[in-house]
Every structure is written in C-alpha cells, then in structure tokens.
Amino acid sequence: MTEPTTRTSRPFSPPTRFAVPARVPVDTPEATRWRTATLTEIRRETARAATFRLAVPGWPGHLPGQHLHLRLTAPDGYTAQRHYSLASAPDDRGHVEVTLDHVEGGEVSGWFHTRARPGDTVEVRGPLSGFFAWAGDRPALLLGGGSGVVPLMSMVRHHRARDLTVPLRLFVSARRPEELIYAGEYGAETTAVFTRSAPAGVPVGRLTAERLAPSLSDPPAGGWEAYVCGSNAFAEHASRLLAAGGQPVERIRVERFG
C-alpha cells in the first residue's frame, strides 16, 4: 500500500464499528512484539509498485485486511516506521508480503525500491487492526482504488486458497492498465475500472452506480459486508456509491490513506 502521511480505518458515516470476531489475532502480546524479518523476494507489479516477501519467524498469523507495523533502523540509530497492509493470504508458512508504491521522498518505500535486496532485514510487528479484517465467514464486496487493492487482494487470495464458497466480488480502479496492480491474478470475481485510458472496448471513467448496481440490487443471502480501501477521494466516492445503491452504511468498512 502507499506510504501514507495518515492512515485511518473507519466505517462510512455514521461512525459505527462492528465487533471484531474473537478469532482475529489483534492487540495480543505476540502481535505487539517486534520481530526480525528477512527479505526473501522482490516482485515487480507495475512501474511504481513492487511486492516484497518477508520471512518472519514466529509470525502469529493474520486475517485478510490486517496490517503490520514496519521499522527501519539506520546505522546511526535513526528509525523510520510505517504501517502497511498485508497482501498475502494468511496460510503462507511464516512469510508475509507487502506491496509498496514508490512514493516520492518516502523514507521507507524509497529504501525498499532503491536499496533493499534479498537477505536484508527489517523489523515488523503485527498483525494489527481487527476492524478491516475479513474472516471469510460472510459475503464480501470489495472496492479498491490504486494500491488500496492490497488488503483486498489478501482477501481474494484467502478465498481462493481455502476454496471458500461464500460470495466475493472485487471492483478495482486504476488510472491505466499498466498501473493495475496484480493484473495477472484477477479472475471472474473482479471488475477493473480505468479512469484515464483503457483497453479497446472498455469504457474509461470512474466507478459508477451502474457498475455496482447488479451486485447491490441482488445481494447474496445475509447481505454484503463492504470493504473500501484507497485514497481519501476514492474512499468517499466509493462509499457514497454503495450507500446510494442500498448498502447499509453500518456495513461499509473504510480504510483510507493520504
């Protein structure tokens, strides 16, 4: 996810939170302890985004939608810390993945994109935050803008890895096809929206009520749990579309950055 100046996880207005499922590993002693993680792989996703795979001994496990706290320490003792969404599915044998945009002037993302190599170590702790987590036990309607798709892809990967039958739909927005993170992984559950340019035959423009209407007009049994992640502008736009389309506002969970 993008290196944010602020990060908030909250529902769309009114500010009502659901109780976190008891099995969500959050705010436990294990989750708040710093661990040394070793970078094992770097995968390029787009010209500006890459996925970094970390081996984390003793990682307590996570749920899709949670994030970790990452810390870099310079030789002189200076530290830089950021919160990043987890991109990997929970069952990954002691590894976690984060996908980072290369932010202009970003201390942490800049180090990862320009200096980090397999074998380097960083410190992490987590998983953190249960509010945006998805346990795979209820239908999920996912809306992501840009790198906001990162925690949502963790949900998609979890859904596939466990062969879950609970309904899941993903709408992901990018400016251009070449900026679509995880482009090679999307399947029938995903609708991609392009705001600047698109492949032949695909309309160009923001996510619209018409695109969401089929999902919102005929929700699955029990209704959708909606997850929205992206910039402030995307989060506000997508949340309002959901509410206008009939999605209960108390069942819209929003994580924004910027």
Image: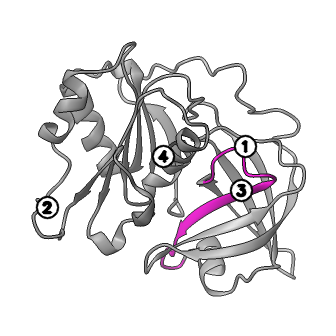
Q: Quadrant of the C terminus?
A: bottom left
Identify residue type, mark 4.
Leu
> Tag on residue 167?
none
Measure the C-alpha gap from mark 1 to mark 4. 16 Å
Measure the C-alpha gap from mark 4 to mark 2. 23 Å
Closer to the chain start, of discs 1 and 3, is 3
In the displayed structure, does residue 122 sit left or right of residue 22?
right
Closer to the chain start, of discs 1 and 4, is 1
> Tag on residue 202?
2
- The answer to whether residue 2 is above or below residue 108 is above
Towards the viewer: 79 or 209: 209
Is disc 1 placed on a helix, strand or loop? strand
Closer to the chain start, of discs 2 and 3, is 3
Residue wearing tag 4: 152
Is disc 3 placed on a helix, strand or loop? strand
In the displayed structure, does residue 56 sit left or right of residue 127?
right
How many C-alpha atoms fall within 10 Å of the one at disc 1: few (<14), some, or many (≥20)?
many
- Asked whether the residues under the numbered discs 1 and 4 touch, taking CB atoms below 8 Å apart as contact, a structural biologist would say no
Residue wearing tag 3: 96
Name which quarter of the figure residue 205 lies in.
bottom left
Is disc 2 placed on a helix, strand or loop? loop
Measure the C-alpha gap from mark 4 to mark 3. 15 Å
Bounds of the magenta segment: 88-105
Residue at position x 77%, y 70% in the image: 72
- Asked whether the residues under the numbered discs 4 and 2 touch, taking CB atoms below 8 Å apart as contact, a structural biologist would say no
Identify residue type, mark 2.
Val
